[in-house]
Image (tube, coloured by chain):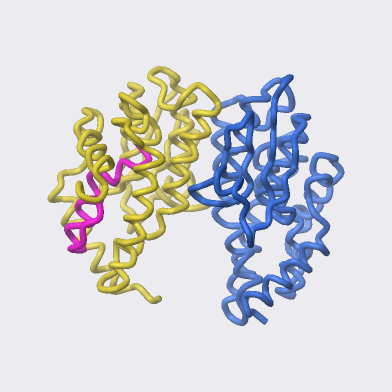
Amino acid sequence: MAGDQVTLLDFWASPFGMRVRIALAEKGVKYEYSEQDLRNKSALLLQMNPVHKKIPVLVHNGKPVCESLIIVQYIDEVWKDKAPLLPSDPYQRAQSRFWADFVDKKIYDIGRKIWTTKGDDQEAAKKDFIDCLKLLEGELGDKPYFGGETIGYVDIAFVPFYSWFHAYETVGNFNIEAECPKLIAYCKSCLQKESVSKSLQDPQKVYDFIVMLRKNLGVE
Amino acid sequence: MAEVKLHGSWPSPFNHRVIWALKLKGVEYEYIEEDLSNKSELLLKYNPVFKKIPVLVHGGKPIAESLVILEYIEETWPENPLLPKDPYERAMARFWIQYGVTKGAPIGVFYRASGEELEKAAKELREMLKILEEQGLGDKKFFGGDSINLVDISYGALAYWFAAMEEASGVKVLEPSTLPRLYSWAKNFIEVPVVKENIPDYDKMLAYVSATRKKLAKNYRP
């Protein structure tokens, strides 16, 4: 749409920000990427997301949209002439919402437990994490994407966490690929898409970031 | 027209959300009461991931998670729309629904806690509700404007079930002195016919909440 002003307030390592980057890329939307310092939040961020003070925030013609999955749905509805992200059938849409919500409820929080805890707590988190990934692997089945033949809402909700897997594995001392080979193969094939490869981060950089966070939190 | 069934549990506000939406859309459905202490084979088949109610089954196909079910109902029966048509307004409606999910954790604590922990949860809830009142509801009668929409439905429990929780715990949170507009919203919400006719008796709810409080407090290990 000509004359659209689109800005994304984001943080490089955030899997939630990556979701929005992928969606914008899939739709071919031109936007300004604005890296935010989360330890020293800008006046713009506080103005655009006064309730949560978090990234990502999509600012479209001056109006902010917050919460990554809500932003992805918004993008799908506004730029609706290209690359539909949600299925058109209401039942399939409900299934997509269910699984994206599952990713939201489980993956970040359990992943966080892996790198912020030790001992029994960490072991429990690792087991929980693998159980969730196996459920997702089952849901994926033999499809190229969760959405079917093309990348969709659940793929966008999930695949950014792949950037964080190396960090989880190294800190937690376990091998995700050994437990969920099909899911990892799927993640790697997603990375063949430019919209994904340009949006995700180098796992080594993410690992270094986690190491720094752990130090700051006093977890060692 | 394919058959619609709802697997639910009478005290659950998550269940009530779905009932109100179905009624507002004029959808005929069969209600199946689930015994949560002895879950049916059917429920476990329909919701293997979470094994919870509510589950809506439409033409034999199950949908779980009340908020997902609400969006499904909205899309499948478009009469009497419960979400704005404009994408930005829809995003704002979804934002406020999600706010209740993200910030609702103190409700769980409020449900079972006592003493200092209860006071702390009450304080957090008051702060969270203040933001909802000022930035979400504003001067509107309902989140949906003159009539209720999915945002109102998602916060419905505040209008009836929460009062039972306040009485059972002995701590008030939703008061006209501190949350005047939300308090009025609650009073108006309960009067909406579809809601009024589809919530449990207050005394039954109070008895249920009190009993559950005791059970949760006993089993809780911090």
Secondary structure, magenta segment, majority class: helix
| x 40%, y 54%: residue | B104
- Which quadrant of the figure has residue A157? top right
Q: Is residue B157 magenta?
A: yes
Q: In this view, does A39 lie above or below B65?
A: below
x and y percentages locating residue A184 in the rendered image:
78, 55
Q: In the displayed structure, does residue A109 sit left or right of residue B179? A: right
Total numbered circles: 0
Residue A17 spot, x, y in % from top left: 68, 48
Q: Inspect this view and state whether residue B16 appears.
A: yes
Front residue of B31 and A96: A96
Considering the image in quadrants, where does the N terminus of chain A appear?
top right
> In the rendered image, which quarter contains the C terminus of chain A?
bottom right
Q: What stretch is highlighted in magenta?
A: B153-174
Magenta stretch encompasses residue B23: no
Would you say residue B63 is visible in this rendering? no
Q: Colour of chain A?
A: blue
Residue A62 place in picture, x, y as percent: 61, 32
Q: Which residue is drawn at 38% across and 40% down?
A: B154
Residue at 75 percent across and 34 percent down: it is A31
Rendered shade, chain B: yellow
Identify the residue at horizontal 46%, vertical 34% (top origin): B93
Q: Is residue A175 above or below residue A134?
A: below
Looking at this view, is B80 or B32 the one in front?
B80
